[in-house]
Amino acid sequence: MVTAHLLEVSDLRVAYPGRGFRARPLEVLHGVSLHVDQGETLGIVGESGSGKTTIGRAVLGLVRPSAGRISLRGQDITAASAKERRILAREIQVVFQDPYSSLNPSMTIGDILSEPLVVHGATAREARARVRHLLDGVRLPVDSAERLPREFSGGQRQRIAIARALAPKPKLIVCDEPVSALDLSTQAQVLDLFTQIQRLSGVAYLFVSHDLAVVRHVSHRVSAVYQGDIVETGPAEQVTSTPEHPYTRRLLLAAPVADPVEQRRRRAERQRLAREAEAEDVPSEPGAYRRRVQGGQR
């Protein structure tokens, strides 16, 4: 018996209007296909401008695909209306990159967390109880509900944003660079929190990041995006340690290390790969270097 994936994206194409009069649209995704299963984390990694964030925005309905199909539990949501998207908010939530601008500064934390619950029909009493549970789940004191966002650090604000995403008990959370604005020690704490929440709730993540080390920490599988195409997909441990595609290898070599000698070697190797890619016009078609695997363990 074949079980449908929680999220399935097939041949997704997205084009943005060109700049200037009569300019042609600029296609930023060229037929991307991926899937996420219940309780799984798929890491999407790539440099700035690769199209990785556009994938998440298309899943959330923030950009309109020009072609392709997006399905949630077998239901086509590619062209969902605004009303349908409000209903889908129970199933799909998001954690944005910037914890400072993603929270309303004039609302208390309790109001921020209870708002989506009330919108979806919860009573005030039910919302208060859920808020207490959410704050405990992200390791914040209960009295945080009476405070304003400005009273919290960046890491604490991102915990609040995670709690808000968890409020309606979604099946999938799109995480758009959720730790890139945090310092390294806070990053580790927030990533551990993501993992613990998934273990307890079974929620799935579409985790977008430019950092291979980050996606390795939280992902079961990883897809590398290069110039609007997925060029490599496989178990997180393999893709982030022994990648096959030259672009993914360059991403791995771009990560800084503490050893100056090793750092120089990695820089030279990265530059060599970049020159080879430019000289040979390395193909980036979907599947060119894709590992055909069924999954992998964190």
Image: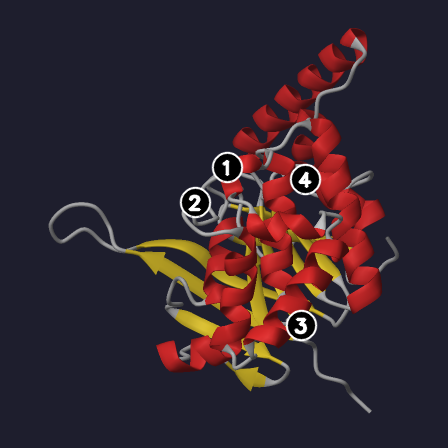
**Residue occupying the point 69% across, 61% down:** 132
Quick check: 219 left or right of 51? right
Q: Which residue type carries mark 1?
A: Arg
Please give the residue where the numbered disc 2 appears in the rendered image: 105
Query: Which quadrant of the view contains residue 166?
Result: bottom right
User: Percent from the top left, x then y, of residue 25?
Assistant: 27, 56
Q: What is the residue that sits farthest to the bottom in this orientation?
A: 1
| Residue that numbered label 1 is attached to | 150
Question: Looking at the image, which residue sits at the far top?
Answer: 261
Is label 1 in a helix, a strand or a loop?
Answer: helix
Mark 3 or mark 4: whose residue is earlier in sequence: 3
Sequence-first tag of 1 and 4:
1
Q: For the residue labelled by badge 3, is the local secondary structure a helix, a strand or a loop? A: loop
Distance between mark 3 and mark 4 Cα atoms: 29 Å
Q: Nearer the viewer, residue 38 or 278?
A: 38
User: Does the rendering let one see residue 13?
Assistant: yes
Horizontal and vertical percent position of residue 192? 80, 45
**Left or right side of 225 for 217:** right
Identity, as a three-letter code, of the amino acid under mark 4: Thr
The residue under the point 37% across, 67% down is 64
Q: Is residue 149 above or below residue 2?
A: above
